[in-house]
Image (cartoon, helix red, strand yellow):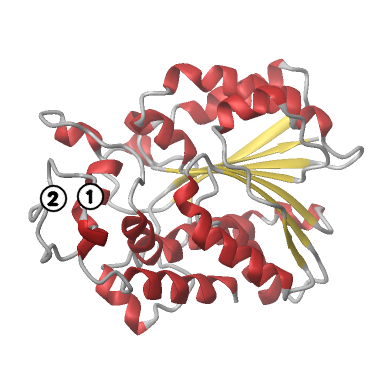
Amino acid sequence: MLIDDVLDFADEEYNSFEINCGGTCNHPSICPNYNQADCLNCETCLEQIHFPKRYRGSTVWTDYDCEKMINYYICKYLLKYSSEILYALENNRFIDYLENYDILSIGCGACPDLMAFETYICNHRLDSTINYIGIDKNELWKEVQNQIIQYSEDVPDISVSPFIYDDAISWLRHHIVRNIDVIVLQYFISHLNNTRQNNQFNDFCDSLIDNVVAYKKDNMPMFIIINDANSCYRGRDRFEVLFDKIREHGYNCDYRRRYFNYRIQHDEQRYGRMYPNINIKYPVPRFIYQYNPWEVCSSAQMIIKID
């Protein structure tokens, strides 16, 4: 399975650095051993990226700008993120409308959504194909994405297009993508929030509708899976903005909302229907435990169906 292949690759890459971070650290404001070779791992750097408001007193980095950190991130989060998408596929069953899956993944990173689709097809023994287009501006994902392309070349039912390394917001203004079945926004909206790009979200929605939704397959539904942090302070309130804009453009559409019952502190986090449990859907390889991996799901989701 692709997820196993990518975890093996990321672990090997992470441990291949002879000294910490290849000799540098890109997040010196909080790294406890900056410029030293005994910094234990990239956990603290990831903390700063994911929760920048906690570090207002220092220079804030908000992107994955270190190759070693990329591989640590994969080992820590990949099972969780793929599981969250897999829950969406298995519990909403919208996928039954489709025979094959032409997917556009925006901010794709290490492609956990592709892994979830592969797992779903295998678990249900479906005779389906996946055609996958991924957009991500961060070229540090390239090594693992090359691994994903190499994997797909040996699997006849998975086709991965060359990855697009560009800012998705600006790229979609100028490019039409035809015949997509599923659009995935996986922790994309919270990333816009962390990087202070919220003011561009309305334009992004318009471009997505004008240049992707408008060119969906005739007489077939299109689905948008939004999977992101369960917090209105990190962009969850934007889910409805996209849905409202699709409807304003004249499309007949509906949505379902879901959430995982993980550390719920406010009623507003009960976002639609609760999933039956929060456990990830993959076994954790023993070697992954050194990365303090997530073994539970925690997101909120909106699944939009466009007729």
- Most distant residue in the bottom direction: 286
Query: The residue under label 1 is which amino acid type?
Result: Cys
Q: Residue at x 33, y 37 (%)?
A: 267
Q: Residue at x 36, y 30 (%)?
A: 195
- Most distant residue in the right direction: 219
Q: Position of residue 157 (x, y in %)?
A: 78, 69
The N terminus: image quadrant = bottom right
Choose the circle earlier in sequence order: 2 or 1.
Answer: 2
Tell me which corner region of the image, top left, top right, bottom left or bottom right, holds residue 65.
top left
Left or right of residue 231: residue 100: right
Q: Are marks 2 and 1 in contact (CB under 8 Å)?
A: yes
Q: Relative to 211, is 140 above or below? A: below
Q: Which residue is mark 1?
A: 45
Can residue 105 be seen here?
A: yes
Nearer to the camera, 222 or 257: 222
Q: Position of residue 160 (x, y in %)?
A: 70, 58
Tell me which corner region of the image, top left, top right, bottom left or bottom right, holds residue 271.
top left
Q: Which residue is mark 2?
A: 31
Query: The residue under label 2 is which amino acid type?
Result: Cys
Nearer to the camera, 145 or 125: 145
Q: Position of residue 8 (x, y in %)?
A: 45, 77
Q: Residues within 10 Å of mark 2 (few under 14, many from 20)?
A: some
Left or right of residue 262: residue 245: right
Q: Relative to 10, is 63 above or below? A: above
